[in-house]
Amino acid sequence: MELRQMRCFAALAEELHFGRAAATLSMAQPALSVQIQTLEKELGVQLLIRSTRRVELTKAGEVFYERCIRVLREIENSSAIVRAVAGKDVDRITIGTIYPATFGVLPLFLSKLGKRFPDVEIHVSAGSTDAIIRDLEKGRINLGFIRPVENIGSLRWQSIANERYLLAVPLGSPLATAETVAMSDLKQERIISFSRSNLSYTEKYFFEQFRKHGLLDHVAYSCDDTLSLVSLVSAGIGVGFVPEWTKDLPNRSFHLREVKGVDFTIGMGLAWNKEDPTANRDEILEIARSLGSLRKPVGKHSEGAGKKRRLSAYGE
């Protein structure tokens, strides 16, 4: 059995499509098929169920995929460890990030990382918290900006920031100048919410708030991301809850207001695999820890007043 065969099978197991896997590996599809057939012949078991419409892993294939990932990750880690012992610097860092981090902590982290490792190749990819955790576990990325999760397994975690959600209202809305804002006031408004299809903790929380206060019939629009929501608010179409980092958006055409009885706070932090020698370098971890102390405290900057209730939040 060769490492090339293991890499081919791992790519195919992840894509479950010969064409896409071949493109990922930069090889011809017939050559990939030969590698897989040779591997199955050497092992004496069927790893895949092939049909004209789909590719599926057999039970043996699922087990072998997990073993492949472990072996390939160990080889990569061994190479990085040897380079570190020999005094070689980091040559590539891959970072996964949830969308909110791209406007908050990520630019500062990249700036510090670039100064410490001026010759390093940095790649950034966006994804959900769950997807980033899977990539960390499989060694595809070195660091991940994610939401806190209840069980992070073998990964390491550094809390960096907390973001509070406030109500975004158009500049000309009566709510922009009201002395206080309550959930009952939203019955006179068209509400913009995040799409229920992403099933994030944030969406679930506000859905329950809207249900509790009899506002579900007033949800007139939905969208998948924060920038789309603030664009709709800025256009005067409605109101919606957004994270506090939106106050730093340039040329914003909306106000942020606290709402009595609602104070939703969700955390963010950096995760990495304890077995990844690149992510565990002291210089990188020190940069990560410094981000928390440099972030502004959340909860004091807003446009409005009201009693506050803290709520811990998990998920993305």
Image (cartoon, rainbow, N blue to C red):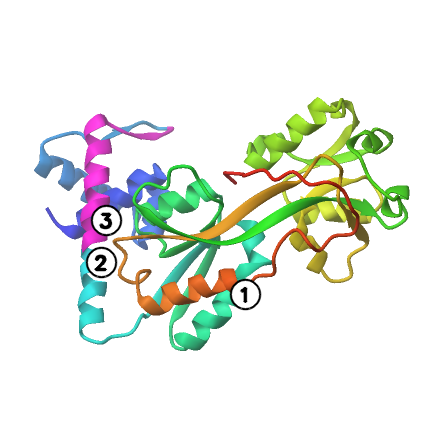
The residues tagged by marks 3 and 1 sit, at their Cα atoms, a distance apart of 41 Å
33 to 81, vertically: above or below? above
- Residue placed under numbered mark 1 in the picture: 294
Amino acid of disc 3:
Arg
Identify the residue at the far front of this view.
307
Q: Nearer the viewer, mark 3 or mark 2?
A: 2
The residues tagged by marks 3 and 2 sit, at their Cα atoms, a distance apart of 15 Å
Which element type, helix, strand or loop, lies under badge 2?
A: helix
Q: From the viewer's perspective, is 146 left or right of 180?
A: left
Residue 58 covered by magenta stretch: yes
Q: At 74% from the left edge and 24% from the top edge, which residue is drawn?
A: 213
The residues tagged by marks 1 and 2 sit, at their Cα atoms, a distance apart of 31 Å
Residue 279 position within the rendered picture, expressed as x and y whole percent measured from the top left: 33, 60
- Magenta-highlighted stretch: main secondary structure? helix
Number of marks: 3
Are the two marked residues, 1 and 2, in contact with CB atoms closer than 8 angstroms?
no
Which of marks 2 and 1 precedes in the sequence?
A: 2
Mark carried by residue 7 = 3
Residue 6 covered by magenta stretch: no
Which element type, helix, strand or loop, lies under badge 3?
A: helix
Q: From the viewer's perspective, is 142 left or right of 115?
A: left
Q: Which residues are magenta?
A: 53-74
Mark carried by residue 77 = 2
Structural crowding at the residue carrying mark 2, measured as other residues with C-alpha within 10 Å and reported as few (<14), some (14–19) or many (≥20): some
Amino acid of disc 2:
Asn
Residue 16 position within the rendered picture, expressed as x and y whole percent measured from the top left: 34, 36
Are the two marked residues, 3 and 1, in contact with CB atoms closer than 8 angstroms?
no
Amino acid of disc 1:
Leu
User: Who is closer to the viewer here, 1 or 89?
Assistant: 89
